[in-house]
Image (cartoon, rainbow, N blue to C red):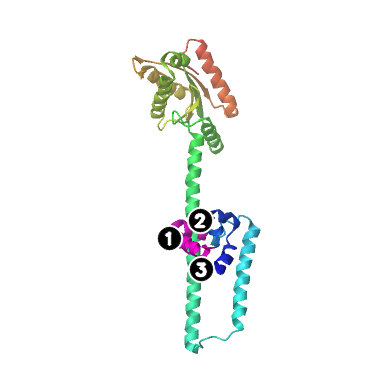
């Protein structure tokens, strides 16, 4: 190809791509050799084929009108080539059988290529949907889990209770709010790292004790919330009292010595007409009543 032909080719390089051709678009004496060298190197790079696929499959055409315009240009180009070839006699006349065979092969490979393109698109879409689904699952987990204790958070627990009441309107349940006694003193005297260890330790204990009996979440700070479906007030009091005893007997370690903590709990039973916020408010009142009465107790 002559140097002038290469010059005309450069005119078709998109303006936003010319920054990739600094030595090509700015030189005229070595234009042809530079282009041949550049494209020989680029054709051997996988990124070249990715960029080509992006262009052919309209990835760079972010507007729907651009997509239609580009498709229209391809159709017009095909029609132009068809009618252009009608004005010229073929160099070789094929026999009828050969022409028929060629049409069959042309049709076969046309549909084969269409099937290949559809396979590529369908596979890409399925992979994208799978990645999107996994990403959404990860986001839902992050949005509903406390990062420190790995327990569910308040949002998750409220949604769980709403679903339970909606699907089991006549089912009894109890809730309980628990707060670690004098937790600020633990943070101030033993350090915040020790305070985090305490929260993680009691969270692991609650998870173990609530297995197949109820649900627990970190409500906020040093407060924990228990949702006990199917339990009446007496059964809930028995269970939470066991939890309270286990917490008091569970050894904590700050790196130098072993110490113990206590908790105070307030329990409220579902009365079939109060909403969730009202039940939580009453449980919270019982919790702080227990705090005023000396802590380390269960109020129901």
Front position among marks 3 and 1: 1
Residue reaching furthest front? 29
Inter-mark Cα distance, 3 to 2: 16 Å
Instruction: Please determine whether, in this image, residue 24 is positioned above or below residue 155.
Output: below
- The span picked out in magenta is 29-53
Q: Residue furthest right?
A: 65
Residue beneath disc 2: 125
Residue in the foreground of this view, choosing between 218 and 178? 218
* Residue 56 vs residue 240, the one in the foreground: 56
Q: Position of residue 244 (x, y in %)?
A: 42, 19
Q: Nearer the viewer, residue 51 or 259?
A: 51
Vertical relation: 136 (above or below) 256: below
Element under label 3?
helix
Whole-number angstrom distance, CA of label 3 to CA of label 1: 26 Å
Q: Earlier in the sequence, mark 3 or mark 2?
A: 3
Q: Residue at x 48, y 80 (%)?
A: 104
Q: Locate residue 72: give its quadrant.
A: bottom right
**Height in image: 126 above or below 92?**
above
Q: Residue at x 60, y 56 (%)?
A: 15
Reading the image, the residue beneath label 1 is 44
Q: Earlier in the sequence, mark 3 or mark 1?
A: 1
Q: Which is more toward the observer, 143 or 219?
A: 143
Which residue lies under the disc numbered 3?
114
Residue 297 in sight here: no
In the rendered image, is residue 14 in sight? yes
Secondary structure beneath dot 2 equals helix
Q: Please say if the residues under marks 3 and 1 sit with CB atoms less than 8 Å apart.
A: no
Check disc 2: other Cα within 10 Å, few if <14, some if 14-19, many if 20+. few
């Amino acid at each position: 190809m002559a140097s002038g032909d290469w010059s005309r080719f450069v005119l078709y390089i998109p303006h936003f791509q010319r920054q990739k051709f600094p030595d090509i678009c700015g030189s005229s004496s070595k234009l042809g050799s530079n282009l041949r060298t550049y494209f020989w190197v680029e054709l051997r790079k996988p990124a070249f084929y990715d960029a080509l696929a992006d262009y052919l499959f309209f990835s760079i055409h972010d507007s729907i009108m651009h997509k239609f315009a580009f498709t229209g240009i391809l159709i017009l180009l095909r029609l132009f080539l068809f009618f252009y070839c009608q004005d010229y006699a073929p160099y070789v006349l094929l026999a009828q059988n050969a022409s028929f065979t060629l049409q069959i092969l042309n049709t076969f490979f046309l549909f084969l290529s269409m099937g290949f393109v559809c396979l590529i698109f369908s596979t890409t879409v399925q992979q994208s949907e799978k990645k999107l689904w996994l990403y959404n699952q990860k986001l839902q987990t992050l949005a509903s889990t406390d990062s420190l204790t790995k327990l569910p958070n308040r949002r998750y627990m409220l949604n769980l209770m709403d679903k339970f009441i909606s699907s089991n309107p006549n089912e009894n349940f109890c809730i309980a709010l628990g707060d670690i006694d004098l937790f600020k003193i633990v943070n101030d005297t033993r350090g915040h790292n020790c305070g985090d260890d305490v929260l993680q330790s009691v969270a692991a204990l609650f998870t173990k004790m609530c297995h197949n009996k109820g649900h627990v979440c970190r409500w906020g700070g040093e407060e924990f919330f228990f949702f006990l479906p199917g339990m009446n007030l007496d059964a809930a009091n028995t269970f939470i009292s066991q939890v309270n005893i286990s917490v008091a007997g569970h050894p904590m370690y700050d790196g130098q010595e072993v110490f113990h903590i206590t908790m105070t709990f307030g329990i409220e039973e579902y009365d079939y007409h109060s909403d969730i916020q009202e039940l939580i408010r009453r449980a919270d009142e019982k919790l702080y009543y227990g705090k005023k009465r000396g802590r380390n107790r269960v109020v129901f």
